[in-house]
Structures are given as C-alpha cells and as structure tokens.
Image: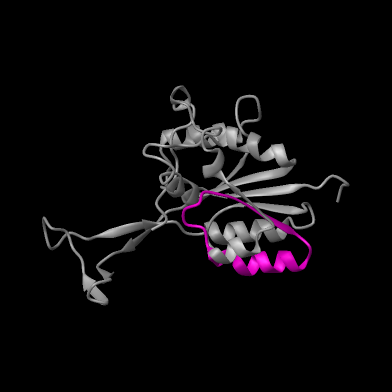
Amino acid sequence: MTDTPTRLWLIDAGYMFNAQRHVARGYNFDYKKLRTKLEESGPLWRAYYLNSTPNPPADAQNHFHSWLRSAPPHGPKIITKLYELKRVRANRAYCEVCLKKVDVGCPRHADHRIHNQQQKGVDVGIATLALVHRDKYDTLALSSGDGDLLDAIEFLSERGKRLELVVFRYGVSTDLQSRADAIHWIDDFADEVHREAQAEDAQPEDAVDEG
C-alpha cells in the first residue's frame, strides 16, 4: 500500500439510474462530472460500473459503455462489468391491502404470459471486487443502497477499510448508512454533476429497473 490513501469506487448502475429520478423530474447525472467531484476529496485507484443488460445490448448501450471506459479528457475511465438480465415469470404479486398474494395477468388477454426483467449478479460482483482487491485500497467508495452488501462491508471494516457512500438520498439502506465513515449525498451537489442536454448523445441512458 502506498503512503497516499487510495479508494476503490464500485457502482451499482441500477441503483444510480433509479435513485436519480428522485432529485427532480427529468434529472440525469454525468459520470464524468461525478468522478471529478469525487476525486476532489482524494484519488481513486480504480472504478467499476456494474449493470445488467439485455443480450445482446443495444447499440446505444454499447456506445455508452465504450464512453465509460474511455480515459479523460473524453470519458470517466470506468471499467464496465455487465451481467445478463433475467426474465422472471410474474403470475402472482403481493397485495398490501389484502395482505396476501393475488393473481396478476394481462388485461387484454388471459393467455398472455407476464414477466419481469430483473438485475442478477451485480451485488455478488460488487462484493467480489471489494474483497478481491482489498489489499489495493484503503477506502471503498460505494454507489449502492443495497443492504445485502452488509456482510462484505463488515468484513472489510473489521480489517481496517473505510466506507464512503456516494449515493442519492433515496433508497439507501440504513444499515449501510450506519457503517459509513462518510456519505457523499449526490443530491447536495446535483447541479454540479448534472448531465447537460448537449451531452446526451455521448451519454445515452443505460440501466434497468432493479425489479
């Protein structure tokens, strides 16, 4: 380990995509600006973007992933790790009023099959990267709100690693918040990392609902 504290930034793309919607209607952030903002408080050793995408990904997604991997001044130099979206049959759902599971179906035809697309593998990927690279960084900068990462976080904390959350105020597990050494609430500097309209062609939206 070097004398200068280093950080590993791990990004759950599904969380970031969904959470940004709660800043303002139509709001989108810029990954390049966000990396620059994060590096104001210290260098990043490496950054990873993890997401689930259709197979094969759309052309716009491929373009976006290429831009993410590009080094400055063009892109934010973020490694991408992509997982395939899983189709999950959705024939029943829980009703909060009836307090039980009820049948769901297509209103147009009863024989139509209903399914959801769910993100799979991202949480495991984040935990694996955090553990495999633990000798390479002092601080884990995490852009995720998922409490399922708690066991990995506690393991790292017991071995002296710091945790910084780089998150929106929406959808962040309180278990993660209580273990963070610092929290960078993106809402507080949302204007600084806002994606300008003219940059949309270079940064098409790329994420999925977490399901």
Q: How is the image coloured?
A: one colour
Whole-percent x and y of residue 154? 68, 68
Toward the front, the furthest residue is 188
Up-down: is 175 above or below 41?
Answer: below
In the image, taking residue 86 as reference, residue 108 lies left or right, namely left
Q: How many marks?
A: 0
Along the line of sight, the residue nearer the viewer: 90 or 166: 166
Residue 153 in the magenta stretch? The answer is yes
In the image, taking residue 147 as reference, residue 131 lies left or right, namely right
Among the 4 quarters of the image, the one containing residue 192: top right
Q: Residue at x 62, y 46 (%)?
A: 48
Up-down: is 54 above or below 160?
Answer: above
Whole-percent x and y of residue 172? 51, 58
**Quadrant of image for the C terminus:** bottom left
Residue 162 in the magenta stretch? The answer is yes
Residue 77 is at least partly visible in this image: no
Among the 4 quarters of the image, the one containing residue 186: top right
Along the line of sight, the residue nearer the viewer: 76 or 172: 172
Among the 4 quarters of the image, the one containing residue 113: bottom left
Up-down: is 150 above or below 201?
Answer: below
Whole-percent x and y of residue 136? 78, 52
Magenta extent: 147-173
Toward the top, the furthest residue is 198
Residue 138 is at least partly visible in this image: yes
Whole-percent x and y of residue 83? 50, 52
